[in-house]
Amino acid sequence: MNHKHSSITIGTHATIGDYVLIGVSTQKKHSAIATFIGSHATLRSHTVIYEGVHIGDSFQSGHHVTIREYCQIGSHVSIGTGSCIEHHVKIEDDVRLHSNVFIPEFSHLKASCWIGPNVVLTNAKYPNSSTTKKHLVGVIIEEKAVIGANSTLLPGVTIGENSIIGAGAVVTRDVPAGKVVAGNPAKVINDINQIDVYKDRRDIT
């Protein structure tokens, strides 16, 4: 049986830990905006999910995960402990985020991409200015891209399909599909076709 409470729907076979909050409102007058979580979800303790979020089946959160309002999250997505997903983020199927990841509003993470621990995406071209909110632009991470631990991605960059971002990289410009980049600022250092362990992912021409 589905679990329903006012505007909240949770699918069957959900496991919900202690102190989990679902459907949190940011409005002074609660407008009962629908929140949906699919079947077989695992929400570990202190997960907070705001209203207007739609999550597919087989979702998993670590402890102390925050997902802000109006996010669209696919099926078989895992978000690690301490991660924060801001509002209006789109995360497609089979995405894995490790611990302490920050994803700001208007980011788009496409299917099967992989985000290492302590990765930070940014969206403010002119932070702490009078026009900051007018110039927000999210990062796009294409299918099967790998983002190494402690990387920082600057506003508006697109990370190409099947590309790899080396640990600690600072990405200031678009990364072509199938390339390996590293450093600060990040530069192309290799091609995924040259790395044997990724041979099952070589669908880039």
Image (spheres, helix red, strand yellow):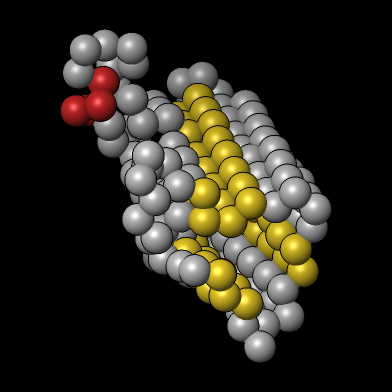
Number of residue marks: 0
Assign the N terminus to one quadrant of the image: bottom right
Residue nearest the viewer, comparing 99 with 39: 39
From the top left corner, tell me how far across and down residue 167 is, in percent. 65, 32
* Above or below, comparing residue 132 to residue 44 in the picture: above
Along the viewing direction, whichever of 39 and 27 lies nearer the viewer: 27
The residue closer to the viewer here, 9 or 114, is 9
Extreme residue in the top direction: 129
**Above or below 111: residue 85:** above
Residue 183 is left or right of residue 158, and the answer is right
Horizontal and vertical percent position of residue 60: 69, 62
Residue 114 visible in the shown view: no
Question: Residue placed at 20% from the left, 18% from the top?
Answer: 131
Q: Nearer the viewer, residue 50 or 38?
A: 50
Horizontally, residue 65 falls left or right of residue 113, namely right
Judge from the rendering whether residue 95 lies leftward or rightward of residue 60; answer left or right: left
Quarter of the C terminus within the rendering: bottom left
Residue farthest to the front, as pictured = 29
The location of residue 80, given as percent across then percent down, is: 70, 48
Which residue is at a point 27% across and 31% down the rendered structure image?
136
The answer to whether residue 87 is above or below residue 5 is: above
Q: Residue at x 63, y 40 (%)?
A: 83
Locate residue 39: give its quadrant. Answer: bottom right
Counting from the top left corner in percent of width and height, residue 100 is at 67, 36
Residue 122 appears anywhere in the view:
yes
**Picture layout, residue 58 above or below residue 96:** below
User: Residue visible at 46% across and 59% down?
Assistant: 53
Kindly give the residue lying farthest to the bottom in the view shown.
1
